Image (tube, helix red, strand yellow):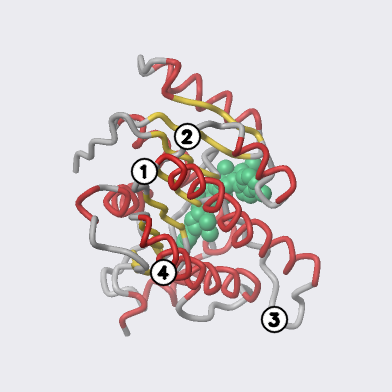
Amino acid sequence: VHFDFTGKRALVTGAGKGIGRAVAKALIDSGAEVIAVTRTQADLDSLKAEVAAEGKPSNCLVCVAVDVGDAGALRPALEGCGDIDLVVNNAGINVLQTFLETTADAFDLTMSVNLRACLVASQVAAESMIRRGVKGTIVNVSSQASLLALPKHTAYCASKAALDMLTKSAALELGPHGIRCNAVNPTVVMTDLGKAAWAEAKKSAPMLDGIPLERFAGVDEVVQPILFLLSEGASMINGTVLPVDGGFTCA
Ligand code: NDP
């Protein structure tokens, strides 16, 4: 599907690898200028090289290396990025621990990256949109793990369930400014994060059995719904939590 984001500036967190990197590239291909945020400089360097190798102009990509879990660093880093019209809050981590093993440190870290960073980035972006009278959009990358409990995912599930409600709160209060906020809730995608939890057939088989389409999602199958929610085609969709899970959560 072709989208046109010409003239838009899009912030993408976790743009170094996996889904975020693919979103950043798809947005550039659709005409947007991307502000790519991640914490590993080498990933930003390789993204820049890849985009240049594809013949894209150098001003289509602004790279920001920051730990999004560090709220004190994130806000000034994003405030220094200029205008923001579109946001994809995608950076996420998953510390695999059972409920009884879950440490306070892992819980706080997960919340800081998967949840608080989305609040801070959305606030900075919304302030920019409201100041300029721009009807921008925000998409939070949540998970099927917000909708049902998964083994060894306590902090992760809790962070994503809270992210769904953060999405609705933003939709409620930013809606009057014409700013929409939605979430996508994918099933497993075999990125680094997905492999860490589900690469073993013993673990993935029961999950696959529960997916009516009988397979996990490809990266592009998550990128496309994100771009749709950012686009004008979704102009009346606000506060939605959209499963991208082949039907896993419908049972
Ligand atoms: P990856 O691990 O492949 O990529 C995550 C990206 O986020 C990396 O570039 C990573 O950088 C960056 N990142 C992580 N923590 C921080 C941080 N503190 N500050 C800045 N950047 C950070 O994950 P996915 O692409 O799979 O996941 C993207 C999103 O999709 C996440 O929110 C995840 O929860 C969600 N999701 C993923 C699913 C899956 O099965 N893969 C399923 C459902 C949802 P670095 O490598 O340097 O740490």
Which of disc 2 and disc 4 is earlier in sequence?
A: 2
Q: Residue at x 31, y 81 (%)?
A: 250
Q: Which mark is residue 172?
A: 4
* Disc 3/disc 4 C-alpha distance (Å): 32 Å
* Residue in the picture at 38% in, 56% down: 177
Mark linked to residue 134 = 1
Comes first in the chain, label 1 or label 3:
3
Task: Verify CB contact (< 8 Å) between mark 2 and mark 1.
Answer: yes
Q: Mark 3 highlights which residue?
A: 99
Residue 17 in the image: above or below residue 189: above
Residue 78 in percent (x, y) is at: 60, 39
In contact (CB < 8 Å): disc 3 and disc 4? no
- The residue shown at (40%, 29%) is 33
10 Å neighbourhood of mark 1: few (<14), some, or many (≥20)?
some
Ranked by sequence position, the earlier of labels 3 and 4 is: 3
Q: Amino acid at mark 4?
A: Leu
The reply to whether residue 15 is in sight is yes
Label 4: few (<14), some (14–19) or many (≥20) C-alpha neighbours in 10 Å: some
Asked if the residue under mark 1 is in contact with the one under mark 4, i.e. CB atoms within 8 Å, the reply is: no
Image quarter of the C terminus: bottom left
In-front residue for pair 133/238: 133
User: Does the residue tagged 1 have its C-beta within 8 Å of any atom of ligand 1?
Assistant: no
Is 182 placed above or below 232 here?
A: below
Q: Which mark is residue 203?
A: none
